[in-house]
Image: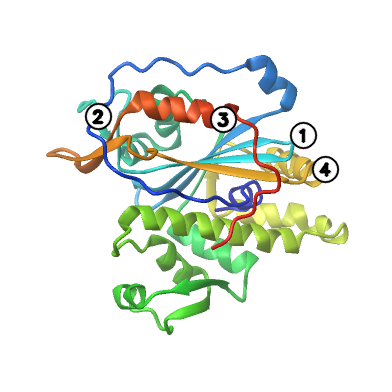
Amino acid sequence: MIILFSIILGGCSTGNLSDQNQVPPSSPSKMEDSPDQKDKKGIMNFLLIGSDSRGEPQSFSDAIIIAQYVPNEGNIKLISLMRDSYVKIPGHKKGYDKLNKAYFLGGNELLKKTIDQNFGIKVDHSISIDFEGFANFIDLIAPEGITVNVSQKMIDDFNMDVKPGKNALKGRELLKYVRFRHDNESDFGRVKRQQEVIVKVKEQLKNKFSHIESLAALPEFVEESLNHVESDMDKGEILSVLSKLVFYPIKNIDSLRIPVHNSFVNKTYPHAGAVLELDLEENREALKDFLMKPSPVNREYHY
């Protein structure tokens, strides 16, 4: 949820998930893509990672989102990958494990390889941010806080000093909001709240840099944002992407959550714990269809 995490993204909706007893194949075929078309449109795939690090050398990924950006069409496609998806991790002695274990074992690069080998999506750039970075970034772009609807269960769980209902939460309190999962929706509700906050942060940034005069402060803002993140992009590359966003504003946003409806079963393994065991071929087909279909016109997202 850094500057790219937020400006490139616009918003997304989520569907309901249910179970299906399928086991993932061990050798998925590669998803077809069109290099010529990608080059022509300037399509870029960004892997956006929210880690649970508090300064440890190794951490797990709380949020895993792929954002595909088509600048000359103004299209964004978001894919939220559930962190408990049971996938094959390259080089892992256990073979299969939770998707977020790939980040724990090998950081951004191993997570990128795992996503490519299981889902057939090549990532151009990766961006990750930890708990402290998230809180600092929210306070940087929204000093007065971001308004969300807080439940009593959430207040009790995190000992939050607010009343139930709409509250403007600052960085550390908003972090509690996006991490909460002790209700009927569990991790699925957490994914929905992560996506909700991305939408609201994007609106904050849109307002902040909506005038030509304010763009002069963009390089300094990027510099400050980079203090909170790990990325394979440098400042110049980020500014290049942002310049495209200025000239090709976002028009359409579409989203998908993996696993899709009726494409997984809940399982438990001694080495991995509770996992979502995917019908990998069905989910790869859903991804392929999603990335190839035209984006809806002027889709809006409300929370």
Q: Is residue 78 above or below residue 90?
A: below
The dot on residue 291 is 3
Q: Quadrant of the C terminus?
A: bottom right
Tag 2 near tag 3, CB within 8 Å: no
- Most extreme residue toward the right is 213
Label 3: state its secondary structure. helix
Say few, some or many: other residues with alpha carbon within 10 Å of mark 4 (under 14 / 14 to 19 / 20 or more): few
SS label for mark 1:
loop
Q: Amino acid at mark 3?
A: Leu
> Which circle, 4 or 1, is nearer the viewer?
1
Q: Earlier in the sequence, mark 4 or mark 1?
A: 1
- Which residue lies at the image location 77% right of the left edge and 34% below the top edge? 72
Q: CA distance from mark 4 to mark 1?
A: 9 Å
Q: Which residue is mark 4?
A: 247
Q: Earlier in the sequence, mark 3 or mark 1?
A: 1
> Going by the image, does 257 lie left or right of 226?
left
Mark 2, Cα crowd under 10 Å, few <14 / some 14-19 / many 20+, is some
Tell me the amino acid under the disc marked 4: Phe
**Residue, disc 1:** 72
Q: Quadrant of residue 41?
A: top right
Residue that protrudes farthest toward the left in the picture = 270
Measure the alpha-carbon separation of dots 2 and 3: 23 Å
Earlier residue among tags 2 and 3: 2
Dot 3 crowding, Cα within 10 Å, few <14, some 14–19, many 20+? some
